[in-house]
Image (tube, coloured by chain):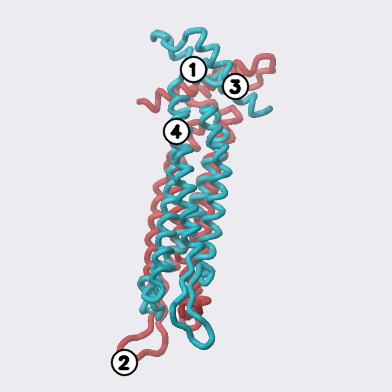
Chain colours: A cyan, B red
Amino acid sequence: MMKHAEDQQYSSLEVEAETSNSKGKTPIMETPFIGKVAREAGHDAGRGGAAVSRGIGIIDFVTRLITLAALLAATIAMGTTNQTLPFFTQFFQFQARYYDLPTFTYFVIANAIAATYVVLSMPFSIVTIVRPLAKAPRLVLITLDAIAATLTTSAAAAAAAIVYLAHKGNTNTNWVAICQQFGNFCQRSSGAVVGSFIAAALFMLLVILSAVSLKTH
Amino acid sequence: MMKHAEDQQYSSLEVEAETSNSKGKTPIMETPFIGKVAREAGHDAGRGGAAVSRGIGIIDFVTRLITLAALLAATIAMGTTNQTLPFFTQFFQFQARYYDLPTFTYFVIANAIAATYVVLSMPFSIVTIVRPLAKAPRLVLITLDAIAATLTTSAAAAAAAIVYLAHKGNTNTNWVAICQQFGNFCQRSSGAVVGSFIAAALFMLLVILSAVSLKTH
């Protein structure tokens, strides 16, 4: 109820602004029929702000689809990597999976959570297309997108630190590079890290899109 | 000029909204003198939205000061750590500094950049206190805060992955824990990581504060 009343108030503000601004200009959009339809639809569909906002909403939705693809690719690439070396000792066989390194476990979990969030955020994104002047869904999205960006970045950065170590090793701490042995494992986990960083960048793009959309209101 | 015109328009909207809303209510704040003063000041200081927005602006500024302290503490703690072991071989002495590990170098640089950003963002934060209904500085801040949160998180997460490894080691990859030898180094870098995570959380708080403030407009 509160939200409805607020939207009504906002809509009346918009109408008043238009009236006061259009003094001395040719009122192109101000035919009674279009005005009535727009008011009946609950927002002023013909206005530039709404059109820009709706356009941003559509870009937002498409960006979410790409983000989901990047997150799923990263999660699956890291989660399914399993390289067994062709030699073994008496006690165990050398095998590399994501849960051998706690950082990679965190990576898989964090990316899976972010992917779930993207799916859950899509209805809100659709709301911003259908009702381009509604502020509430944008503000929910901008906050949660920023949190998702942080989560994805933390996973990608932590995994990147470990992947870098696996590739290069570190002579100061005596940590040897393992990518000579586990080449396939390293390659797939590097790919997963790249996918995750792309997803984090797309989340930042979503934050900026929402901010620009709020500016046009 | 554009910005000024927009603010003027916004301010006239506010006045109109107040007029249309206060029909049938006792106009407590509507004495001519207060109305004149508020208009002269360029915003409606007496309104709830502006007061809330200004309150959030003050919290925002204080949060920035705490964030700066956390970032500086993290940068300095990591940057100045220098532990030399009391024994040495013929060729070199065992010494641990932040630039021995590329991840820690990135940590110091990223935290220093974030600290610089916080200092540069403070004038914008002051603008949101002085002009609580201005949208542009909020939107600049919400975007840059989200980017700073991501930067700080990436540094903290990458360093956390290395610190974890330094503490626990990893038997699967044959990376031994180095904290037995470099206890002081590990302790200080762990503290720096915690400081950086606190800063990242505070950046997220700033994003949420800005979003809430935009909602009250």
Q: CA distance from mark 4 to mark 1?
A: 23 Å
Q: CA distance from mark 2 to mark 4?
A: 65 Å
Answer yes or no: are tags 2 and 4 on the same subunit.
no
Mark yes or no: residue B189 visible. no
Local packing at callout 3 (Cα closer than 10 Å; few below 14, some 14-19, many 20+) is some
Q: CA distance from mark 1 to mark 3?
A: 12 Å
Mark 4 — on which chain does it sit? A
Residue topped by disc 2 = B90
Callout 4–callout 1 Cβ contact below 8 Å = no
Q: Residue at x 55, y 29 (%)?
A: A134
Residue topped by disc 3 = A9
Residue B120 x %, y %? 39, 47
> Please, is residue A189 above or below residue B28 in the view?
below
Label disc, if present, on residue A17 of the rendered structure: 1
Q: CA distance from mark 3 to mark 4?
A: 24 Å
Q: CA distance from mark 2 to mark 1?
A: 81 Å
Mark 3 — on which chain does it sit? A
Q: Give the foreground label among 2 and 4.
A: 4
Answer yes or no: are tags 2 and 1 on the same subunit.
no
Residue topped by disc 4 = A56
Answer yes or no: are tags 3 and 4 on the same subunit.
yes
> Please, is residue B157 above or below residue B56 in the view?
below
The amino acid at mark 4 is Ile
Q: Dot 4: what SS?
A: helix
Which of marks 3 and 1 precedes in the sequence?
A: 3
Q: Residue at x 60, y 21 (%)?
A: A8
